[in-house]
Structures are given as C-alpha cells and as structure tokens.
Image (cartoon, rainbow, N blue to C red):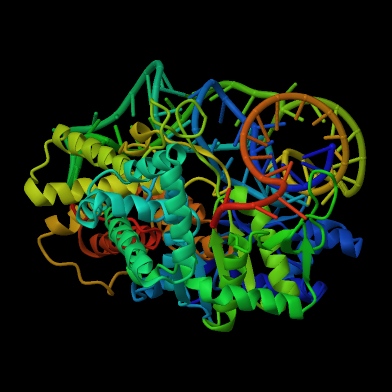
Amino acid sequence: MTSTYETLRERLQVAFDALEMGADPVLRTSERGDYQANGVMALAKRLSRPPREVAATIIESLDLADVATVEVAGPGFLNLTVTTEFLDRQLGELAADERLGVATAPNPKRVVIDYSAPNVAKEMHVGHLRSTVIGDALARIYRFAGHHVIARNHVGDWGTPFGMLIEHLVDLGEQAAASTLSIGDLDGFYREARSKFDSSDAFKGRSRARVVALQGGDPETLRLWHVLVNQSITYFSEVYDKLDVTLSAEDVVGESYYNHLLESVVEDLRAAGLLVESEGALCVFPEGFQNRDGEPLPLIVRKSDGGYGYAASDLAAIRDRVGTLHAQEMLYVVGVPQAQHLEMVFAVARQADWLPDSVRCEHVTFGNVLGPDHKMFKTRSGETVKLVALIDEAIERAFVILDDRGTDLDGDAKYLLAEQIARAAIKYADLSTERQHDYVFDLERMIAFEGDTGPYLQYAHARVRSIFRRAATPFVPGDAHFALAAPAERSLALGLLAMPEAFTSALASLQPHRLCTYLFDLAQRFTSFYDTCPVLASEGALREERLALCDLTARALELGLSVLGIDAPPQM
RNA sequence: GCGGCUGUAGCUCAGCGGAUAGAGCAUCGGUCUUCGGAACCGAGUGUCGGGGGUUCAAAUCCCUCCAGCCGCACCA
C-alpha cells in the first residue's frame, strides 16, 4: 500500500514539478493541519515571485480532491487536512496488511553488520551494551526491511594476551579453568593471569613462548586456545540469551579467523604500491591523516616485530566481506574512540580497491553510558559494571514492581515477565536516545511504568490486548468502517498510518530512536483514545470501528517493539 | 597543537532550515463510581553555551570564542 505521507508527497510533487522540476515540497507532519508543505517559500524565492501567488498556482494544479483539503497560511505554508474518506480507505488497507504499511526494500542487499565484539576470556561489561543492543536493533530493522543481514561478532580472540591466558589455563588445569570461565569470575581469570605475568619472569617467559607457539600453529597450543575460545562463546551466548539478542555462535568470526589472510593483505598492499616501511613497521599512509606533529599518520599493518596489528585484520575483514561474502553494505557498530582508526582502515581499503564506492560502509558510532555522576559508568568501587549484573538487577527491580501491583502470576511465568520488562527497560533506554549522545544510566527511571520507557510501551500494549480478552464476541477484522468522529480516534488513526515513515526514517538514518519516538507518541495517542472512547461499551458499527483501531494499535506496538528487540507480552 | 563529539525548561532528553522551541519526570491544579488509575486533561518555567555571519526564515547551516569528553605510530 502507498502510505498516507507518500500519497500526499506524490500528489504535491506533480504540482511542484509543474513550476520547477524536482522542487521539494518539504512535507512534514503539522500541529496546524495534519500535514504541512513548506516548500513554497523557497520555490517562490527561486522563481522571484510572491510566495502566496506561487502557493495559489500550486493549489490550482493540485490533484488532492479524494485525499485532503488544502489552505494557504502565513507567508505561504500549505496546510493539509486529510479527508475522513481517505483515512477510512487507508485504515482498511492497513488492517489487511501484516506489515502495517511498511514496504520491503525494492532492491534487497547483502548487509554485514559488525557488532558486540566482546573479548575472549573477559567478562562482558557496560562497554559492550550499546554496540550489542544498537547493532541487534539495526539487524532486526534491516531484516524486516527485507535485506539479507550477515551479523558478524568480531570477538577479540587473538593477540599477545593469549600467551599468558593459555599458560594460566595450564597452571589451573583444564577442568578447573573451564568451570571458572563458564560460571564464575572471568575477570578474575584474566586478572590472575595478568598479575602472574607482571610478577613472575618465569611465567612471562612461558607466556611469550606460548604466543610464538600459538602463532606458529602448534597443535597442542591451538587445542588449549580452543578451550578458552569455546568456553567464552558459551558464556557470550548466555549473555545474549539474557538480553534476547539474535547473535549466535555462528556469527562469531573473531580476529583469529583472518590470520591466514594477513600475509596476502600485506602482499596486495605492496603490489598496489601502497606499502611503506617506517621505523621497521609496514605502513600505509592514507591521505588526510596527521599525527600530533602534523606529519602523515600511518596505518600500521605489520609491526616492527613482524606481528600483525588489528589494522591488518580489519583490512582482511573488509576484503573478505566484500570479496567473499559479497557485502553490498557494511555497518560497524563500534564506539566513537575508534573513529579515526576505522576511517583510516576504510580509506586504505578504498585505495587498495577492496572497497568499491558502490558499497556503503559506515561507522555507526554511539556515545558513552554514564553513571549518576555523569562520568563513565562504574561501580561504587570503581570497577567496570558487568552486563550480567546489570540485567540481574533490572530483573530484581521488575520483580519488586510486579509484587507491588499484586500480580497474579507466579513461578516461571512471573520470572519470564520480569525478564521481559527488565530487557525492555535497558534496551529502550539505550535505543531511545540519539545514538551519538552519551546517556545517563538510571535504572529507576528506565524501568518505571510511567514516562518514555520500554515498560510503559509494553503496558500500553498489554492494555489494548486486555480489551480483546474481555470482549464477549471475538473480533473479526476487516468489516470496520472508520468514521473517526471523535478527535481522539482521528488522532490515533493518523498515528497508526505514520508507521512507514517512522520505520523508513530509522532505517535510513541508522537511528533506532526515531522508531522509539514514534512508538511513544502512538502509545500516548492510544491512551487518550482509551480514556475518552469506550470500546466494549459501545455498540454496532462504532464498536467495530473502535475494536479495529485497538487491533491496529496492538499490532503496531508489537511490530515496532519487536523490530527493536523488545518483547510485547500480552499480559502484565 | 591537530581532528572529532557534546553543550536546549529544575532533572533526563527530543527537535537539526520553516509559522508562538517540545516530551517525559518532578511541581501545581483539575477529571473520573476507571474496557487494567501504572490513567487522562490543564498550567508554569527556557539569553536553545557566548558572539558574529548566511537566509524571506536559524536551536538547526558557516566562522569564532568558552566549557567538557574522546582520539592522535607498532594493545586490540
């Protein structure tokens, strides 16, 4: 179906084109009418004609009779009020459309989304929250748009620390180490290894030898390394389950995967004439990057000791993703401190012809999670906050809230609901703010049922559903007519019809928060409607109409939330 | 020093070229014998960090200054 906005835009475009081909009508939603077109003033300026006269000309040729009424206001705004007949038709189509008007991409793409990226043998902490949650929401949004998403979890599973980690594993014994790694204190494992490395020369020596063995492909060393990696992947999966994140073990393609490609990366760069040796390291100097002394800044592909840095594996990953996976678009959901590094990697990949201009490649940045003191979120004692601890605390709070309101659920059902609420609180708080901004983590506020929160949206959804549970006769979708006599009905209808634009906007800008804003607005429109328009108590056609509006609202909330990775429980 | 990000109501945040700058929370006042009151309606508050400029129109674009955060060659 063609959305309401799109219908209006198309009609306006014809009229604007008649005066100047391609002139933008600048169509927006409005508080004065339903929509307003602001493009007249700019066009009038270009034509050197009085704006109101241009507006009159446009209205004359505007074919909107079956859609909306128009009037000129102020200096030349076109205020559009959609007709009830048109709304009725649109809602009828919406009701019959499982996608609620959201179109699928005309040209589905293969999209690689790189997100989460925790480190093997280390605990996941708040630092991984945003990449994981935002990345997963984008993956779901892209999938719903009809794209083929290839999720990549670029875990840190290689490098010099693995020498000491493996030696520590050997010291502990594999059985003991395995249980530590899976159940308990991952950071403790890492810290112990580190402190032995720092305090014991013997251990340091063994660790270094172990790194060499690892890089040399020694089978026993690789076996031990696999123990570490597999334990970690199991642990990651548990965290992803807790968060309801779609990443699976198959999406884990860590740094180690690119090892066998690094040499050829270097060779290709050399062959392309991009490689420069500087202070013993093999570098590429992409244009436009300077160090603090104003000298060209290198991307170090191979270190002076012969080892490869992460630039090399990032380059190999691009070459692999474009060359082998045939990615047509790549998103890196990675913290903003990596901005320069990634820019350089992308620049080099372009120079090396691994990254054609036709492939959109974007660094999707995000701000920091701050504590109540507005500094980087840490525990009271100054340690990083573990993701699992964060989720568990949210679940406990959800429990308390459920008890307070006297839930009739208990046991597993109650726990499941508490989990759903906790996840909604954490994810929605993260997704509903502009991605690049820092935000203050305040569990109390996030999990509240009032305000712009995940649980509020879930609650709104549950309330709609409850209407259908109470209805004596089952609701039959499809035969409703929408008279929209009450203002709250009309407002809700307009909200329901605006889903496609909200979705498209979130997708195009890689900003899930635009969808959040939309859903919150829709929920508010619904509660106003709910307050003033009795549903079950009304009769006949009016009852059918209101039930149909409720049905659409429930579906819209559920769809919107699901695409953000948030559950919409039918009852709370 | 260079580069990037940020600075909007008491608090948390939207808005990023259009008509009097919005929401949530908090505050105050109403509604309602409530299809789940964890509701709805209404009210107040802002040199949109400061200053210049571009434009018919600037919180939004450009320049500059101030404040804060982050990066700037071998750890990923």
Q: Nearer the viewer, residue A185 or A118?
A: A185
Please give the name of the residue rendered at 60% of the width and 64% of the height, measured from the top-left corner: A308
* Residue sitting nearer the eye, B63 or A467: B63
User: For the point 10% across and 51% down, which residue is it?
Assistant: A412
Q: Quadrant of residue A300?
A: bottom right
Q: Nearer the viewer, residue A233 or B6?
A: A233
At 67% across and 73% down in the image, what residue appears? A266
x, y (%) of residue A565?
36, 59
- Report the number of numbered marks: 0
Q: Seen in the image, is A541 located left or right of residue A452? A: left
Q: Specify whether A562 is left or right of A331.
A: left
Left or right of A12, for residue A46: right
The answer to whether one can see residue A293 in this image is yes
Q: Is residue A15 above or below residue A198?
A: below
- Residue A360, by quadrant, is bottom right
In x, y percent, where is residue A557? 35, 57
- Determine whether, in the image, residue B53 is placed left or right of residue A89: right
- Residue A184 or A461: which is nearer the viewer? A184
Residue at screen point 55% across, 44% down: A367
Question: x and y percent of residue A65 in the render?
Answer: 59, 72
Q: Residue A104, position in %: x, y?
A: 47, 77
Q: Is residue A459 visible?
A: no
